[in-house]
Image (cartoon, grey):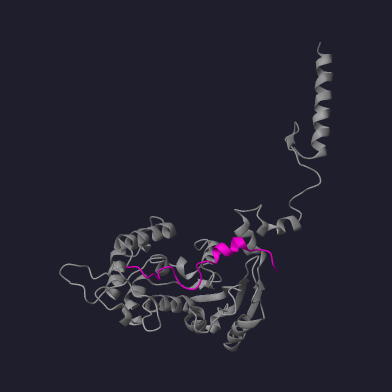
Amino acid sequence: MTSFASLVGLFLLLSTVHLSVQNKGSTPHIKEIVVGRCYDYQYKKFGLNATTWKNCSKIWEALYGAFAYKNPCNLTFADYKPYFDEVGMADIYNKSLFWSGTYKAVHSYSEFDIRFTTLEDTMAGWIVNELAFCGNGNLSRNTTDGIDYDSCPKWNESCDYTTPFWGQASKIFAENARGIVRVMVNGSRGNHTPAYKRDSFFGKYELPSFHVEKITELVIIVIHTINGMEYERCGKSSIKLLQEDAKDRGISVSCRDDPDDVRHILCADHPLSRECIFLDEAGYRNRTVVRYKCRNPRGLAVSGKASWLLITASVIAAAFTVVNFK
């Protein structure tokens, strides 16, 4: 299928890793941002019900204590465990949405937990999503806060300083998935970057962490870009490997290429674009009868040719009334 694309292509640009992976230093004012997001998230979720609110100062201290004044290349899952313990994560039933190579598209699809729930829609992920944070063991405890605002390590295999946080977050998110779970992958990435890799976050931390007895089905959603190659589809190449890996774990699997519900959501803001040509195919445009709405005396909506007949009848009736009252 070669429809549904450049629009989706825009959503697939930021693909393989979280936006927190930068070569620059830690995000300025990170403390204020984290604490503010913590309050904002809870307000959106719980309103003013204070009995359910978590302590945002403690959450910041748990995050800060994990990396400040430390060599970022030496961090482990254990460093961030206090943060995840403080934030917590509830079980998610039939709404868990995982992703690989589809960052923008998947979050448009989830719409902040309204339709589905991504890791970044949970409190643990949302608070720090798109933020960079690293410490430096050489910084002075007397004159600095231990956060390196100038430079965080460039990612490489010997210094993967983001995985102790996001790898652990991914694992916990998968452990709390229940019922139907979904994963959105990019089938247009090319032979050198397959849609599914066993060493990706999904392959390494999420798929192996599912409680199989609590998962009823894994739905694989494959997205393609228009005017580009469709390197992979359901049942082909690495997606076939994903299907096999899930089945080997005892999980029931289904796969869908460019499902309509994803296309409709992405086309909502661009109904006249080429990517949304399926609206023409469905007959929603180029009607043979142009519709004009008017209302008859009883308030019934009438359109098309019927409206002209009603207007004509109304004019004749009015003229007859005027004549009779003279």
Left or right for 14, reference 320: left
Q: Residue at x 31, y 77 (%)?
A: 72
Identify which residue, 256 or 150, lies in the foreground: 150
Q: As drawn, which residue projects farthest toward the left?
A: 142
* Residue 47, image quadrant: bottom left
Q: Main secondary structure of the magenta part?
A: loop
Quarter holding residue 222: bottom right
Left or right: 275 in relation to 59: right
- For this rendering, which residue is in front, 190 or 251? 190
Q: Residue at position x 39%, y 60% from top?
A: 42
- Compared with residue 42, is residue 243 higher up or lower down, i.e. above or below? below
Tell how many labels.
0
- Judge by depth and name the residue closer to the eye, 251 or 63: 63
Residue 86: x and y in percent read 34, 72
Let me know if residue 115 appears in the view: no
Q: In this view, which residue lies farthest toward the bottom?
A: 248
Question: Height in image: 86 above or below 47?
Answer: below
Residue 239 picture quarter? bottom right
Residue 98 magenta-highlighted:
no
Task: Based on the picture, tell me whether residue 10 belongs to the magenta stretch.
Answer: yes
Relative image position of residue 130 (x, y in whole percent):
41, 65
Q: As displayed, is residue 161 above or below residue 249?
A: above
**81 or 291: nearer the eye?**
291
Which percent across, then down, holds residue 253? Answer: 63, 80
Residue occupying the point 37% across, 84% down: 158
Quarter of the image with the C terminus in it: top right
Q: Position of residue 62 (x, y in %)?
A: 29, 72
Residue 155 placement, left or right of 1: left
Where the N terminus falls, by quadrant? bottom right
Task: Work out whether residue 274 can be spotted.
Answer: yes
Q: What segment carries the magenta color?
A: 1-25
